[in-house]
Image (cartoon, grey):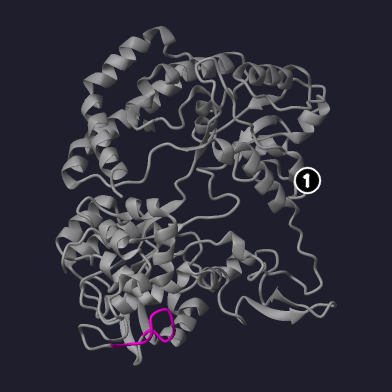
Amino acid sequence: MKKTNVLVGLLACGVLLAACGSGGNTDGSGNASNGSDNSGIELGTVGEFPVVKETLSMTMMGPGTGMAEWKDMAVFQSMAEKTNIDLTFTTPPSADFATKLNLAFASGDLPDILFGTDTNSLTPAMEMDYGNQGILVPLEDLIQENMPNFSKILEENPDIAKSITTPDGHIYSLPMIHRGETAIWPRGPLWYNGEWLEALDVKELPKTTDEFYDLLVRFRDEDPNGNGKQDEIPLTDVKMDSTRPWLLAAFGLTDRTIEEIDGKVVYAPITENYKEFVTYMNKLYSEKLLDPEVYSQADEQKKAKGQNNQIGLFPDWFSFFTTGRTEKESVMDPMFYPLTSEINPDRISPASTRLGRATFAITSDNPSPAAALRWVDYFYSPEGNDFLSVGPEGTFWEYAENDKGEQVRVFTEGVDLENTEESRAKVTPNYGITVPTMAFPDSKADFPPVIANANDEVDTTFNDFLAAETQEKIEPFAKVTFPLLYLTTEESDKVRDVATDLKTYVEQMEAKFITGVEPIENWDKYVQTIESMGVEDYVAIHQQAYDRWASTE
């Protein structure tokens, strides 16, 4: 296949299929948009079912979660009927999948399609290596002619194309694109204990590091849980991994690694901002405002403290995961408001790139890459996303009429209402793994939630609360630490060992600075050690990669 830069191609063609003016016959790879592809396989009409006119067999490999065999899942069975593509599956357990995939590449015994992979199993280096060898099929020309849904997404979100295009100008895999109330979260937020705020008559959340400190002192000293004991833990976490981004943002940074600030790449752990962060956290730790067990406890211990009403501020995806309260009760637990500090007057919230890369790829053994892309393109539509989420009608859900004469979606008989996710996991592979699709929050009216009984009222209180908190406290201040991009093979080779060494050293030293094992007076010695590890070249390589990414139209 010819090597055409996908971004140039998309720009020239206006991205959308109809604008490319190819007459509907062939794409740049010689694959027919209608009629037959290079192998003589008769294709249907782009964007319609069936994908192929006669049954076509393909093989697929993906990570199994152990809930059901993919061949028995209603999503795949229904897709076979819709598309005329009959799939045979190889699904090693998720825990072993990366190893099994490596063995498949090494032996050459590869499937036609990789589905549900991620950057841990199909790494960026693997994409480029096996793409350059011709083992993974370049998709950019095929996307333009065979994926109208995904092409529209690329047109409306140009950074997605930039982030899935390798330095050689090719796209070798398709992403999972997150949208919705929580998609902007890079991880679970921090939540205040609403009962404690009420007990202390706190009317407004802290907005500076000084105000935050003062509130934590009140949590420690004023018995907000009302048990007469001084057993309150103002702030807790497990190794600071979830709390760090939210508090680090108060000092102008969002992660403990490379960071892009106004086009310049910096190594955050040697900046004055980071020094101020660890100094502040040491103050909290030394005054027992930060949990003394922060570096020794597991998540289960953190949750036990939450359910015992001992925590004032804590990270989790939803607050009730830690407190044990109900969803409705949890709307009293406000999300952390971003802070400012003396070194950083601007509010910042860390934000997700909203992309999960490398979820779908095609190997050179595939009998019809065009057909494979038409098959997966359905999942990038609102209808297809819903289908991949909850399966076809009659398996996990069905229509029923309520007392108002309205058609609503209810769980089918046999679904465990105490554990609906386990039932859903037997219907679709979209459970516990990343899959090629895009969430469409605006499509909820067309695809309402599935409920237990036809006359149940859909309670949106908690989702409305999440949306409001996110819109107030994250979206206006959101900053992505560093864009998703690819390093060249040469760049990857140069930074691989340095990255590991830096990560290990910084992790150790952060814990020592915060707990006081290493006095902050040794900061200069710490910086000199990092400089001796090759951080200057490490930053320069990422600056080069960032400049390349930023200059791509």
Residue for badge 1: 329
**Which image quadrant: the N terminus?**
bottom left
Magenta residues span: 42-51
Q: Is residue 226 visible?
A: no
Other residues around mark 1 within 10 Å, as few (<14) / some (14–19) / many (≥20): few
| Magenta stretch secondary structure, dominant | loop
- How many numbered marks appear? 1
Answer yes or no: is residue 140 visible: yes
Left or right for 133, reference 177: left
- Where in the figure is residue 127, as x and y percent of width and height? 25, 57
Residue in the image at 74% along x and 16% along y: 221
Q: Position of residue 31 (x, y in %)?
A: 24, 78
Q: Nearer the viewer, residue 214 or 241?
A: 214
Residue 192 inside the magenta-drawn segment = no
| Residue at 56% across, 26% down | 293
Apparent side of residue 131 relative to residue 243 in the rendered image (left or right): left
Q: Relative to 498, is 417 above or below? A: below
